Amino acid sequence: MKRLALMTLLGSSVLLAACGSGSDSGGDPRGRLDTDYSNLRLADPALGPLSNQHPPSDFSEYLRNGVRLMVQPQGQDGRNDGDFAESPAAEDSAGGGENFSQTNVHVLGVDEADRLKYDGEHLFVAESPYYTYAHFAAGAEIAVDDGFGGSTEPPPNQAVRIYSTQPEAVGATWMARYEFERSEENPLTLSELYTLDDEEGRAQSVAALSDKRLYFHWGWGDTPSYGRRAGATRVDLLDVQSPGNPQLDWSIELEGALLNSRKIGDVMYLVTRTIPQIEGVEPYPDSQEARERNEQLIRDASIEDLLPEYSVNDGDLLPLVTEEDCYLPREIASDQGYADLVTVSAIDLRSRELVSSACINAQLSGIYMSLDSLYLGARGGSGSEQQTGLHKFTIEQGEVDYRGTGVVPGHLNWSDPAFSMDEKDGYLRVVTSVRQGWNDFDHYLHVLREPETGDTEQLEVVAKLPNEQQPEQIGKPGEDIFAVRFLGDRAYIVTFEQMDPLYVLDLSDNENPQIVGALEIPGVSTYLHPVGDGYLVSVGEDPMSMEGGVKIELFDVRDDNNPLSLETHMIGGQRSWSEALRDLRAFNFLSVSDDSLRFTLPVTRRENYEWVDSGLHLFEINNLTGEEAVLEPVGSMIVEQPQDNSNGWHTDSGNGRSRMHGDTVFYLHGNDIWASDWSDPENVQGPFTE
């Protein structure tokens, strides 16, 4: 990879919004290079159709202008990298037809990386590393401040664990631990896994995803957002056909920080982010000599220098994209610049090759993928003038091709844009919010599609809510959106201020959507999961209650006009927490029959704000085919309590996961696997070690 110069870390788009700039048309009569960038301006690439037909000179100068804007020490726009969305799915989205559960995903057929994978015979665990910001500061050659602290060694626990399972005996056996080599020069952090399966669904290979995110001590709250604009992404493919002796089979490393990924069949899609990395460029130059040196380096940079690269098996560097693969706004001016590049790379894991890559020049706010299409959401403007551009690509057999762009007002859901978009029958349905004031929102549903004739590079809006015929607002004054779920011809939206309205939208006619029902209940739901035919189960909180806790609720939505809350169960008191509140992969489920569904979620329980215990909580929903379904708590697998820890504080288990196989439940807490029988969850077996 190109050397990650200090400029790369500091030169994020945080600096772009408030910087002026100028052209590089030449020096002044005294022979100086023109380093006055006050006439340059930041482009807003989020809106309007894109093009990959710009002359190479215009393309490269646009990126160079973006670099020029970056190196100026003025202004911060506070932007973040956004989240990444995938299309919602039916209730069996964890995959299967088997008697074991898998990763809970947004759409059936689109797999998502996770730190726990299961093929029915073996559990594969990506160990969760513990590290400090100093690891990354050292890798970026940044002096560590006195208050930074921490080791400069690479993060520990860079390994994949493999267990064989014995569900009939409620147990698991340690098989192997494959440890990755890390160094101070390449401080990659293992994050998540995919499996590449054989025809019978058993894992042949495990794809281990690692990335390098460089952080700078610029305020604890903002640091991660800035750091994501530099780094590297690596995929190591392990041969696990002999689970007791895994072997490294193939690897690929991409320039750019890993933002997210998905896999359809054998093809894995990596979403990475880079900014041009020009070695020697000095951020915030404080002398004319340094500014002129910067300008000369920027001018001398070729297109190849400005675009990301990749390598296979640590071999020669190759271009990840060319200018023909990159899409900029259709209209760009010579005084505009924007340097952030988001790249989508399709990698065939079975043939072990990069199939295609495409990049756009945008401030990303969300990604949505169906089985056929990829939508990149990008935001432009601010406040009540903010808009979201939706760039559509087809993804047939790994080939990523641009189709067109649509624009809607507002921004995607702040907590999980995964549930703000959905594609059905060629229509894109999207929910956005426009902030009119500090606590004042307008919420909209828009329906877009490619035009049947004419300009295929402009997605047209064919319907929206509210409208003149359907003026009812989505949400009451002061209410923000906390959860959205599209399910076929219906959409469910949860808004919240002090109560928790659940809105039901009828989308059976995509060009005439309607609000058909609403239900007000205490608390707020942040995750909605479909169950059976006409039920939803939610995970949420009740922040207005003194008792607090994690709230599990069952809704009957068989009658669109009259949604009902059937049962509520609270876990813990104030400040109790579950990863499932923010990450659907922490919510695991298994359909036992047409009449019964089981689900689990990890919870860190507190009472009176004091930590009580951490464990996995088990629930059943029964009588799904009867007159009315019933929510039943089964019990909990408690694996950590204050007396288990010398400092009285729980393990940082923010990636707790579980899998079910028949009547056995496997629970990943920290880096350890535990097991229990469904009928006796308090009798916990484990952890299973070497």
Image: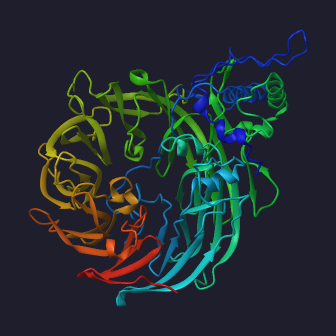
**Splitting the image into 4 quarters, where does residue 441 fall?**
top left
Seen in the picture, residue 363 relative to 570 is either above or below; the reply is above
Rendered residue at 58%/79% (across/down): 177
Q: Position of residue 648 (x, y in %)?
A: 36, 68
In the displayed image of the protein, which residue is found farthest to the top? 29
In the displayed image of the protein, which residue is found farthest to the bottom? 169
In the image, taking residue 436 as reference, residue 157 lies left or right, namely right
**Splitting the image into 4 quarters, where does residue 234 fall?**
bottom right
Q: Position of residue 142 (x, y in %)?
A: 69, 46
Seen in the picture, residue 581 relative to 423 is either above or below; the reply is below
**Residue 333 visible (yes or no):** yes
Rendered residue at 34%/58% (across/down): 580
Q: Position of residue 576 (x, y in %)?
A: 27, 58
Q: Position of residue 627 (x, y in %)?
A: 8, 63
Seen in the picture, residue 165 relative to 620 is either above or below; the reply is below
**Residue 99 visible (yes or no):** no
**What's the colour scheme?**
rainbow
Seen in the picture, residue 627 relative to 505 is either above or below; the reply is below
Rendered residue at 67%/37% (across/down): 326
Total marks placed = 0
In the displayed image of the protein, which residue is found farthest to the left? 627
